[in-house]
Amino acid sequence: MSDEIKHYCGLFGIFNHPQAARLTYLGLFSLQHRGEESAGIVSSDGRTMLKHIGMGLVEDVFKEKDLAQLVGRHAIGHTRYSTTGSSLLKNAQPLQVDYSRGSIAIGHNGNLINALFLRDELEAHGSIFQTTIDSEVILHLLADPSYAHFEEALVDTLLKIRGAFSLVILRDNELIGVRDPNGFRPLCIGKLGEAMILASETCALDILGAEFIREVEPGEVVIISDSGIRSVKPFPPTTLSHCIFEHVYFARPDSIIFGESVHLVRQRLGRQLAKEHPADADCVIAIPDSGNSAALGYSLESGIPFEIGMTRNHYVGRTFIQPDQHTRDFQVRVKFNPIRATLNGKRVVVVDDSIVRGTTCKARLNNIRAAGAKEIHMRVSCPPIMHPCFYGIDFPTRKELIACNKSMEEIREFLEVDTLGFISVEGLLNSVTGPKPNYCTACYTGTYPLPFGREANKYILERKFAGEARPPGMAVSGGRDMER
Ligand code: SF4
């Protein structure tokens, strides 16, 4: 990743294990890449729920004493990057409340496109919200006392919310997993002895030595209890819209999502890139780590040797104190340092998974050139990002996206590379094995699978226009107003 696109959320849930909170903690470690701003765990012993949440990385938030207090055989956990609402402790998940039917906790990955509409309705009937995140709307709908049974409330809630949502829900004696009918975000089911597990990615099962059973299907609700696992499918059939950017960048290469290995998809992206944009070069290097698999694919297809051209410093954390910036590229070099022995005097193909603003990419390429590269042939394993995402990924605005503001030749000149090539949308879709219409590619094509309100943005629930009356007739986020 050449510019820091923020990740969104990682989900984990476990039912019926004596070390439920500790295993959740380990699971969250594997899902850290999906959210670095906050982390939380809620555990249940069947009667009482206990919660520990905090800002920061999993290792910062949980100490031994915190885990020791999270007793119970069931737990859910969440790592968060804010896609709706500011990065504040009050917005950290899982959200947990006590209500008329007992206790309930929820972790959400994705974005609801009709959250403002639903929140307005709920507030008009007296609901009081404690956060500015869309996920709280789900809790309020679930808590509606007019339903005779929880499952009725759950189904009705799921039919009201729209957008991208993978959910883990913990009740006193039930763990529930949900995927939206479009299947934007992943969620899988695993098993460890007698315990059942839900996780955003299979890498969280691997760390525990758990068995991968299957993915939660798009539009499926799985209810795990002492009676076993039940499946409910409340949604009418719809087109699938798996986020293809999960395969390009977000998911870990050791995960299986949307039915296939992320590493193998990325390798095919690299092969496709080599076919679409060949280069006359001495070596292929990756921008680590997310460019690794695609660079390997480029090398295998082109026959140009794969080399390690950059090393990554894994110890540069969020607490790193930046000294005065004596050199323009210092901040980049402290994370990724080029290897002169690989690059000096060579014609180099550099493979990265995406270019967003272009500024970080440019700095890295400057460092590669300073390490002696004679020619640089930049290859990118996803098409130019031209449009915002409303389904849970926080891209910069169109003003900041380099592909919105420069032609291909202007980008090449800006990056100061000899040649530049992005994979085509067609090539991207050829690299996954599922049917092409089953993937969302809206950030490249502008063709959005679900409509959204024109004011949709991550701060929408904070009423950025607080104090001003909302303009009459202003569309709200994907609610009924959108359908007028
Ligand atoms: S717009 Fe892009 S990032 Fe968002 S869901 Fe679609 S493919 Fe994924």
Image (cartoon, rainbow, N blue to C red):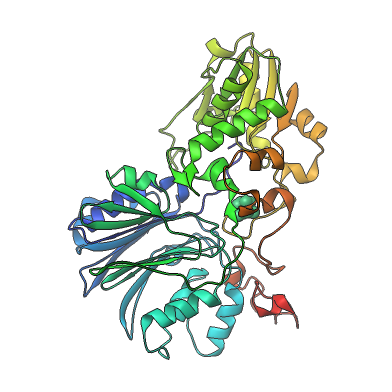
Which residue is located at x 52 percent, y 45 percent? Answer: 250
For the image, the number of numbered tags is 0
11 lies above or below 175: above
User: Going by the image, does 300 lie left or right of 274?
Assistant: left
User: Going by the image, does 331 lie left or right of 315?
Assistant: right
* Towards the viewer: 461 or 430: 430
* Towards the viewer: 313 or 199: 199
Which residue lies most toward the top here?
345
440 lies above or below 138: above
x and y, in percent, of residue 46 in the image: 21, 72
User: Going by the image, does 159 lie left or right of 102?
Assistant: right
Quarter of the rendering occupied by the N terminus:
top right
Which residue is located at x 57 percent, y 85 percent? Answer: 121
x and y, in percent, of residue 11 in the image: 40, 56
* Towards the viewer: 481 or 192: 192
User: Going by the image, does 200 lie left or right of 286?
Assistant: left
x and y, in percent, of residue 119 in the image: 55, 79
Q: Quadrant of residue 416?
A: top right
Quarter of the rendering occupied by the C terminus:
bottom right
x and y, in percent, of residue 413 in the image: 79, 28
57 lies above or below 329: below
* Towards the viewer: 443 or 116: 443
Which residue is located at x 24 percent, y 53 percent? Answer: 22
Q: Quadrant of residue 256?
A: top left
Taking the image as drawn, is residue 366 in sight? yes
Which residue is located at x 52 percent, y 65 percent? Answer: 180
